[in-house]
Image (spheres, grey):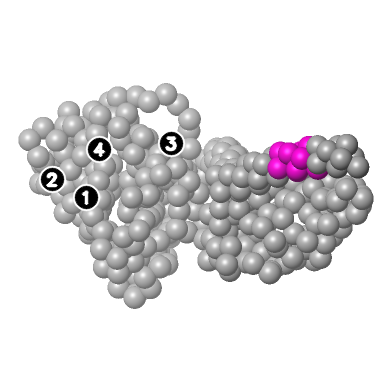
Amino acid sequence: MALNDTLFEIKLKKLSQELASHKIELQQVRGYLQCILQNSNDMIFATDVDGMLVSFSKGGEKILGYSWDEVAGMFISELSVEPEKFEEMMEMATAKGSAERVEFPFRHKNGDIVYCDVYLITLNNTKGQRVGTVGVCKDITKWKKLQDELIRIDRLVETGRLASGIAHEINNPLAIINEATGWALDILNDSEEIKGKDREELISTLRKIDEQTRRCRTITHQLLGFVRDSRPERKEMDLQSLLRETVDFLIPELKHTSIEVSFHFLEEPIQIRSDPRMMEQIFVNLLTNAIHAIKEKGNGDGKIDIYVHRRDSQIQISIQDNGIGIPEDNKDKIFSLFFTTKPPGKGTGLGLSICQDIIKKLGGSIDFKSEFGKGTTFTVTIPEA
């Protein structure tokens, strides 16, 4: 009996040691898993067989804005934009054992949509029975926005190409109308059969046709110059004349508003040496932003003031509006690529970033001051010729 008791004690001691070793391993595994859940930037969750959350990583809290206390006991499908489709995806993962990479939208706590790459893995126990599901979700919202913006840029490029072709096509009939109008005026001036009031009205009408035809040709030439892609060039130009021409270019957008544009220019011409198309692009962007800001405020008495000042060998151009202004939270981001406060389809978030880049290449700088609810002033500083 003594020998059997000794052998039993030895086996019991060995089993206890193995159990202690497994317990340590289990604790280590739990520690590793907890470390992954705490430090991963991805949203990692675990559910029971019904899809109810039993674990939610810190990365998930960052991505969706919810704490674990807020989502504990919720169904993971409730956090998605389309719960029914997400449940179907969970069922498919259960049937396959795992799901391939799927792009799926979730709803952030603040209401925004967060796009994720989702991987679902079915959890089975040692008996092969399903006990839950693990999901690993990588936030791809920025990449989705970048894709959308690239598509929009491509569309803008195509629009510019089409606009260029249309402008060329319009120029041909305009030239014919212009020549025909001049020919008609010459005949009328030589004719003695039409006299009195009829003659005056006919001459006045032909001159109006000629004036409006020339105006149309000016607009198409401005459009061609604006969309034409060419290397930067440096040539001397009158800055104040360029600013007036830029405002004329925006007349179609201004004429249906109550916005008043005022020029505060120096008496003498301001000569600069720069690229006229690039400078025009900068001013068109700033003026368009001012128009949109005034429309957004919607008080009906919009005003844009354009100031030109000389500071030593520098020229400062300030475009001041009484629009909605820039919120304090957005001031650090307005020159960031793809940042826009405009609704989808209304803005690309490229304008101010491109303006800043162009101005730097031309040896200048851009700055702004804004008070939310009162208006904004953008100031461009460039070297004088």
Real-space Cα separation, disc 4 to disc 2, in angstroms: 15 Å
User: Along the polypeptide, which appears first: circle 4 or circle 2?
Assistant: 2
Where disc 2 sits, the SS reads: strand
Residue 102 on image: x %, y %: 76, 47
Residue receiving disc 1? 318
Q: Nearer the viewer, residue 57 or 7?
A: 7
User: Along the polypeptide, which appears first: circle 3 or circle 4?
Assistant: 3
Magenta: main secondary structure equals helix
Real-space Cα separation, disc 3 to disc 4, in angstroms: 24 Å
The residue stretch that appears in magenta: 11-22
Residue receiving disc 3? 225
Residue 150 on image: x %, y %: 58, 41
The image quadrant of residue 156 is top right
Residue appearing at x 21%, y 35% in the figure: 382
Real-space Cα separation, disc 2 to disc 3, in angstroms: 27 Å
Residue receiving disc 2? 309
Where disc 3 sits, the SS reads: helix
Q: Is residue 337 visible?
A: yes
Task: Tell me the quarter of the image containing the C terminus.
Answer: top left
Residue appearing at x 36%, y 56% in the figure: 330
Where disc 1 sits, the SS reads: strand
Residue receiving disc 4? 365
